[in-house]
Image: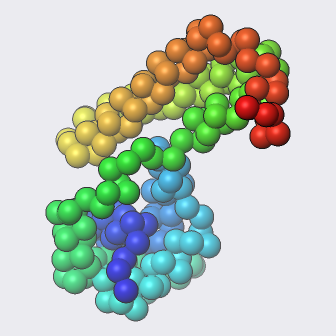
Amino acid sequence: MPLTDLEHTVLGNVWKKGECSGYEILQEFTHSTAAYYRSREGAIYPLLARLVRRRLLRARADKQGNRPRRLYSISPSGLAALKAWLAGPIPEADATVPPDLVRTRIYFLGAIEPAKRRSMLRDAAKRIRGQLAANRRKLKHFESTGNVFAALAVEGISVVMQARLSWLRRVECSPEFAAIPRTAFSPRQKA
């Protein structure tokens, strides 16, 4: 059975961190810049167990204080699977437009009145600017620690977010934005 992108991402995180606990992997996902990779404990721990069963990760018991924990490391077959995923080819779906729930909301903005549309756009822009500031801090950290590829990934995220911000300004400034009547995109409207 082929590995999922999430499983490959876990393999990559274990490879990058070296031997680490499930909690450390969970923290990577909890604090991820990409919402797609934010994951909960209920998904990560079973995924780690699957990767161990498939011999892509190794696990060993460890005791930190009074708490037992498992430490994971990547196996040779796990590293081979990670390298094969990284080398490509890139699936067509991975080269398409990523999910964007702000864009999805804008698609349906005709359902609310102009004042609420503006409020939504301003809130989205404010949150994107906040994420951009957080990304600048991450970028500085990765650059200062010599983590070149992490810095490049965060730079890519920042470029996409800057484009989103620019596009939100275009949406808000478009002459049609405020003038669209509430029922303009109603599914029952006759053509």
Q: Horizontal and vertical percent for residue 99?
A: 51, 47
Q: Is residue 94 left or right of residue 25?
A: left
Residue 110 seen in the figure: yes
> On the image, which quarter does residue 4 sit in?
bottom left
- Viewer-proximal residue, 96 or 142? 96
User: Would residue 70 appear left or right of 177 to someone viewing this image?
Assistant: left
Q: Please, is residue 59 above or below residue 174 in the view?
A: below
Q: In this view, does 130 lie above or below 59?
A: above
Q: In the figure, residue 135 lies in which quadrant?
A: top left
Can residue 59 be seen here? The reply is: no
Question: Which of the pair 31/69 is nearer the observer?
Answer: 31
Residue drawn at (40%, 91%), measured in percent from left and top? 53
Q: In this view, does 53 lie above or below 16?
A: below
The one nearer the camera, 116 or 132, is 116
How many numbered dots are placed on residues in this image? 0
* Quadrant of the drawing holding the C terminus: top right
**Residue 33 image position (x, y, % from top left):** 47, 44
Side (left or right) of 125 relative to 190: left
Q: Residue at x 31, y 83 (%)?
A: 56
Residue at (59% x, 11% y) in the render: 174
Q: Position of residue 37 (x, y in %)?
A: 48, 56
Measured from the top left, where is residue 171 in percent x and y? Answer: 57, 18
Q: In which quarter of the image is the N terminus?
A: bottom left
Observer-nearest residue: 139 or 61? 139
Which quadrant holds residue 94? Answer: bottom left
In the displayed orientation, state which residue is furthest to the front.
Answer: 191
